[in-house]
Amino acid sequence: MSHDQLFSCVSRRTLLSTLAVFAMLPETLMSAVAQTVTGDPLPSWNDGVAKRSIFNFVTAVTREGSPDFVPAPQRIATFDNDGTLWCEYPMYVQLAFALDRVKTMAPLHPEWKDKQPFKAVLDGDMKALAGTGERGLVEMVLVTHAGMTTEEFSGIVTDWLAAARHPRFKRPYTELVYQPMLEVLAYLRANGFKTFIVSGGGIEFMRPWSERIYGVPPEQVVGSSIKTRFEMRQGRPELFRLPEVNFVDDKVGKPVGINSSIGRRPIAAFGNSDGDLEMLQWTTMSGGLRLGLIVHHTDSEREYAYDRTAEFGKLDKALDAAIENKWTVVDMKKDWKVIFPPSH
Amino acid sequence: MSHDQLFSCVSRRTLLSTLAVFAMLPETLMSAVAQTVTGDPLPSWNDGVAKRSIFNFVTAVTREGSPDFVPAPQRIATFDNDGTLWCEYPMYVQLAFALDRVKTMAPLHPEWKDKQPFKAVLDGDMKALAGTGERGLVEMVLVTHAGMTTEEFSGIVTDWLAAARHPRFKRPYTELVYQPMLEVLAYLRANGFKTFIVSGGGIEFMRPWSERIYGVPPEQVVGSSIKTRFEMRQGRPELFRLPEVNFVDDKVGKPVGINSSIGRRPIAAFGNSDGDLEMLQWTTMSGGLRLGLIVHHTDSEREYAYDRTAEFGKLDKALDAAIENKWTVVDMKKDWKVIFPPSH
C-alpha cells in the first residue's frame, strides 16, 4: 500500500465516522457542526462574489426543506480538465506528451525525417506543425497513442508524467493543478456530490492519475477516446488501442459524453473555455438552481492571462454567455490566494 | 419524495452509521459483528458450491492482510442484465417494448401495413419478423427508439414499464428480477464493491429504473446505445436521439464498454450467456483471485430452462469456458430458494 493509498483509507474512515455522527444529529445542528469541524472549506479563495456563489449554491441544494434541495444521488458536478483543473499553457499537457512520444519513437521510423507532421516535430518547428492543420495533429495523436494495449498505454503515461517537467515552472505537470479547484472538488464531495471530469483530452491520458491527484476515480472520468479491440492473445485477454478516433468530448460532444457516461444532467459545471459552453448550457438551462462557473485566466504573473484570442483555451462565446446566464466568472488574479499547491 | 426514495434515504443513513461503527472496531471483531448484524446476506440461496464460492471470494478480497486483499476502490463488479438480473423469456423485455411501440406509432405510419419489418409486427407474425433478419430488427429498434429527446424517451420507457405485464407471470417486468441476485448486489455493496450493469440492452432503456430496482445509479449502467445530437431549441438545450447505432455492448463489445465507461478491470463478473463470455474472460483471466459466475437457466417450472440451443440467451461456449476456467455455474433450480421477489 502506497502512502497515497494509506492516506486515502484513513481519510475515508474518518469521513465515514463524521458522516454517521451527522446523520444522527438533528438537522439544525448539522451545519453548525460542519462549520466547527471543517472551518473554511475554501481557504485558498479570497472573499468575493465567486467564493460566495459557490457557498450559496451548495448550501441551497443540500439543506433539506430548502426549495432548491437536491437529493444526494442527483448531485452531479462536472469539471473540465485543461485550464480548469490544471495548467494548459504553453500547450496542452497531452500535446507535450505526443511531441515527446514522436521523438522517442523516431528511431523506429526513419521515414519521419521527411514526412509531415513528424518532420516538423523532430525539427522543433511548431509553426510548420501548426501548418499541417487538424489532419496533421490528429495523425500525430493517433500514431503516438495507438498500437499498444490499454495497460501498456497507462504505463507509458505514468512514466512520462513522472519524468516530464513544465518548461516555465520546472515542476511535474501533476503538481500544476489549481489548489483552489482541489478545494472545490473536496468541498462538493463532502456535501454529497459525485465529481466527474469531462474533458476534451484523452480519457486514458487522465485516468492513470486522476484518482491520486483529484480524488476522481477512473469511472468518473469522461474524455475523448480512440477505438479499442478485444483480443485473446496467448491465452490473455487484451484491449488493443487502434489508430481510429472513437469520440471527441468537446463542445457539443460534452453534453453527449455526459449523457452517455453519466446518464443524468449535472447540477454544477466548471469550465474555462468555449469548449465548455455546451456543457454549461446543458447543466444550467434546465430549470432549478444550478451552478455554472468559468475560470478566467487573468494572472500572467502567477500563471497565464488569455481569453478571446487565445490559441489554447479560447474563451469568447462562453464569456458572453456567462454574463447573459449569470454564471460565476472567477478572476484568477483577484479570487485566488494561491494558484498551485506547495511543492513537495 | 416517493416511498422508494424515502426508504433508500433511511437505509443509507443506517448503513453509514453501521459502517462507521465497523471502521472503529478492531478488524477481528468486524466479521463477527457483520454476522450478528446482518445474518445470512444471501437468504434466498440454498447452501452449496455456488453460494460458498461467492462468500469465499468476498471474504478473501475484503480481509486486510489476506494475500488476495483488494482495496475498496478497485472492487468493481459487473452484471449482465437480461437473463442475469431479470427474466429474458419469452423474449427480451426491450423487444416486447419495441413491438408495442410499433403498434402505438402505426396510426402515424399507414405505409407500415405493407412494409417489413413493420407489417410482420402489426400482423403479429413473429416468424415473418425473424425472417427480416438482423437488418429488419435493427430498423425496428431504431425507428422505435429514436426521433425524440433523451428526456422524452425516458418518460416513454417509464410509462410503458408501469403498464406492461409479462405474458406468463402477469406481473410488471421490473418485478421479474431475480431475488437471489438482488441479494448478491446488496451483499457486494455492503462489502465496499461498486456494482455496475454491463448489458447488451439499450443503456437508456435501463437507466430510468436501475436505481429503484437494483440500487445501481444511471452512471453505473453500461449498455448499447444510439447516437445523440446536442441542440439548442427555443432556448432550451436538448439531446436528440438519432436513428444510428453508436455502440453494441455485447460479446467483444463488453470489455470495450467496460474499459470505456469504467476504466478499470472488474474483479467479479456475472452473466448467463455467450454474450458475456468476453466480459468473464476480461475479468477473470488477469491474475489475482477473481469471481466469474454464470446463471444457468434450469428451472422450467418456476422460470425457464434453456442453454446451448436457445433463441435468446444462448449459453454454449461460455458454459464450456466456465468449466475450463472454474467459474461458478449457478443451477437455478437447485441453488435458488425463490426466483422472484414477492408481489407487492
Image (spheres, coloured by chain):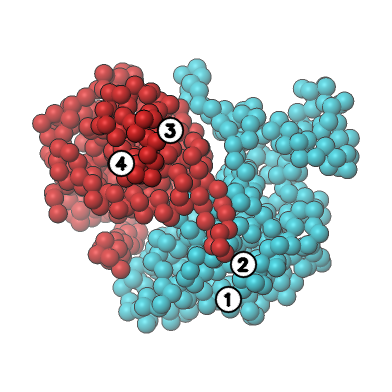
Chain colours: A red, B cyan
Q: CA distance from mark 2 to mark 3?
A: 42 Å
Count up the numbered dots.
Answer: 4
Q: Residues within 10 Å of mark 1 (few under 14, many from 20)?
A: some
Pointer 2: what residue? B293
The mark lying in front, picked from 3 and 1, is 3
Q: Report in which chain the residue with disc 1 lies.
A: B
The answer as to whether the residues below labels 2 and 4 share one chain is no
Q: Which mark is residue A139?
A: 3
Q: CA distance from mark 3 to mark 1?
A: 48 Å
- Residue B174 in the figure: left or right of residue A53: right
Pointer 1: what residue? B53
- Label 1 amino acid? Ser
Pointer 4: what residue? A103
Residue name at image x 35 percent, y 67 percent:
B20
Q: Secondary structure at mark 1?
A: helix
Is residue B5 in view?
A: no
Asked whether the beta carbons under mark 2 and mark 3 sit within 8 Å of each other, the answer is no
Which residue is at the front of the view, B337 or A19?
B337
Q: Position of residue B15 (x, y in %)?
A: 43, 64
Q: Position of residue B278 (x, y in %)?
A: 61, 57
Q: CA distance from mark 4 to mark 3?
A: 15 Å
Image vertical order of residue A53 relative to residue B235, above or below: below
Residue name at image x 67 percent, y 55 percent:
B275
Q: Report in which chain the residue with disc 3 lies.
A: A
Q: Position of residue B221 (x, y in %)?
A: 54, 49
Image vertical order of residue B314 relative to residue B227, above or below: below
- Residue B112 in the figure: left or right of residue B74: right
Q: Report in which chain the residue with disc 2 lies.
A: B
